[in-house]
Image (cartoon, helix red, strand yellow):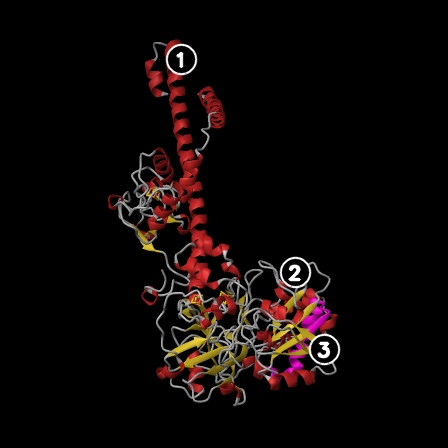
Amino acid sequence: MLAAVLSLGVMSVVFGLLLGFAAVRFKVEGDPLVDKIDAILPQTQCGQCGYPGCRPYATAIASGAADINQCPPGGEAGILALADLLGRDPKPLNPENGQVKEKMVAAIDEPRCIGCTLCIQACPVDAILGAAKQMHTVIEQECTGCDLCVAPCPVDCISMVPIAQTIDSWRWPAPEKARIAGSYR
Amino acid sequence: MSANLYHDGVDILHGQRRLWSFHGGIHPPQHKHESTNLPVIRAKLPERLILPLHQHIGEPAEPIVQVGDKVLKGQMIGRAQEFLSAPVHASTSGTVVDIGDYAVPHPSGLNATCIVIEPDGEDRGLEHPRVGDYLQLAPSALRNLIRDAGIVGLGGAGFPSYIKLNPGKLDGIDTLILNGIECEPYITCDDMLMREYPREIIAGLRVMQHALQARVCVIAIEDNKPEAFRALHDAALHEAGIDVILCPTVYPQGGEKQLIRVITGKEVPANGLAIHIGIVCHNVATALAVHRAVQDGQPLVSRYVTVTGGGVSQPRNLDVAFGTPVRDLIIQCGGDPAAVKRLVMGGPMMGYALHSDAVPVIKTTNCIIAATEADIVPPRPVMPCIRCGACADACPVMLLPQQLYWYAHTNDLDKVQEYNLFDCIECGCCSYVCPSNIPLVQYYRYAKGAIWIKEREHEQADIARQRHEFRLDRLAREKAEREARRRLKKASLAKNQDNTPHTEEAVDND
Ligand code: SF4
Ligand code: SF4
Ligand code: SF4
């Protein structure tokens, strides 16, 4: 028995080292175009583009498999930036991928949480803190607002709430569009 | 002395000291005499004082009292949290009745944490230790005392003063400028303060000089304030090394970089600080506050505030305890809060409209304009830019406002930065002169905010990317480990079977 535990331990260390070595040795050099596209994407990691995260979508854009108008969180600004980078014509967001929404954050109604850890497994950025049979909490700062934790919750205790504006986060809005209509151009 | 001397583009000599001109500037109607006719009196204490914990640039103070506590005037109720912060003191004696969110003076109209005090009417002060001879104090001890007195720049910016009283790496600075310019229309609180407390202001200046080890001190006053000039001039007659200077009136001469240029002829480098060229500016009211802190051990609990505009029948300056709601001041100056069309905190050029008259006076409140219909220029239609260049002529920073406008308006945030958006001091000269009524400075404020938001989003996206990648790595690692364990188990299983082919139960029990 002891021998089995020991050999398991030794093996796991060896495999760990091997894996680590393989990661370094066979590291695929990052495609600079993919990096550039990925830098524009909002990193919400929500999957609305049809890919399992921003980087896979960036890879698909770079290879020509995906169009540039599939990311709702990036909004119009994101599409414009992609069009600019790739020298293509901007186009409106593909409605099949969703709509542009205000950024929200997830909030767990803590008294109702049953500690099932399903939301933790769904969160793409590990922004939920908790353990089995213990109350879970969203780390608001790290939450990207991707929505992915909402559906798995068996007791529906997670909701997406708007980010409260504070004096520190408030910034001057643009002057009223009505007043400037036709003022330039 | 003609008002537009600088505008002839000639540098002028005043007395023995040469003055330099700065580019641009405007001469808006002054509206100052309205509020200087009546003597300054103390504003009545309100039923409740609302003291925001954030009345300065930097981190908000942290409350150190609880609801129900009895406090004395001058008692610290909010402690400075970080290096860049300032404490808050009770502005009269009474009871803390709430600590919570209230409307505060801010262009957003949002709420922030405040400590609410119900005055007991006795105005009992805390006994503060007096310093005696400040020259015996080390400059750092002097700075701590000024920090603990809650003193921030009273000219409107609210930067914690003790930081600007540190010469840093220098043994001492070259020139300490006391800013008594008060160039914005309507505002007269510094004017009245200079008329009434010239000796105390000079005493405060001496304390600042000691802290900074400044070689020369200059007090600069615009020539639309002859009484204030005379008062300080006379008070400084027998003081060595203090020049009291009268400057021709032009807006925005009170801007730090503009005033430094006028007095010393030096340019503060873009992205640089005045202290880098051996110069520090403080406001006259800040000097008085420093004097009171050092001489009388009195923390900053009140200030002069100009209450003016057509909405009040007795425009004047009041000595106001911090936390007093603006509404009380309007009533005390013979105004009807309901008849006020627009309430502005600060001047008409750089101030902002308040969303409510319930907001309190804070350390940076220099002026309240209660405007009626008659005071407000009806909004004029905005027309296309005709590229007349008037804005560029007026800009004191020598920017190209029409270019900035073009890029801010089309949301080209990279380009607008290339045109030095962040050097813009938001003085509003460009908007003031624009014949097409384009709200130029609003665009610059918007663009600055939009850039800030974009940068913050970028930072957050970088963090999210990293966290996501870490997570993917972790999942891959876990998967590989599971795989490895499985293979291992399989291997040992096979081995066991080889060695002891007849003990299947033992394997099952493993
Ligand atoms: S849709 Fe979601 S996952 Fe896809 S690129 Fe946009 S933010 Fe990333
Ligand atoms: S003053 Fe107004 S109209 Fe003239 S150039 Fe500037 S923005 Fe254009
Ligand atoms: S608001 Fe900015 S751009 Fe306009 S005149 Fe003042 S400094 Fe120049």
Please report the residue visible at 49 percent of the width from the left and 55 percent of the height from the top. Answer: B417
Vertical relation: A71 (above or below) B313: above
Q: Chain of mark 3?
A: B
Distance of label 1 from label 2 (alpha carbons) = 77 Å
Mark 1–mark 3 contact, CB under 8 Å? no
Q: Main secondary structure of the magenta part?
A: helix
Are labels 1 and 2 on one chain? yes
Please report the residue visible at 44 percent of the width from the left and 54 percent of the height from the top. Answer: B413
Vertical relation: B103 (above or below) B313: above
Q: Quadrant of ligand 1?
A: top left
Tell me the quarter of the image containing the C terminus of chain A.
bottom left
Q: Characterize the local packing of mark 3: few (<14), some (14-19) or many (20 or more) Cα atoms within 10 angstroms.
A: few
Q: Chain of mark 1?
A: B
Label 3 sits on residue:
B16
Residue B66 x/y as whole percent: 47, 68
Label 1 sits on residue:
B495
Vertical relation: B206 (above or below) A49: below
Q: Characterize the local packing of mark 2: few (<14), some (14-19) or many (20 or more) Cα atoms within 10 angstroms.
A: some
**Which amino acid, by three-letter code, is at mark 1?**
Lys
Left or right: B288 with respect to B325? right
Q: Earlier in the sequence, mark 1 or mark 3?
A: 3
Q: Earlier in the sequence, mark 2 or mark 3?
A: 3
Report the span colored magenta.
B194-217
- In the picture, the disc for residue B108 is none
Judged by depth in the image, the label closer to the viewer, 2 or 3, is 3
Residue A150 x/y as whole percent: 29, 46
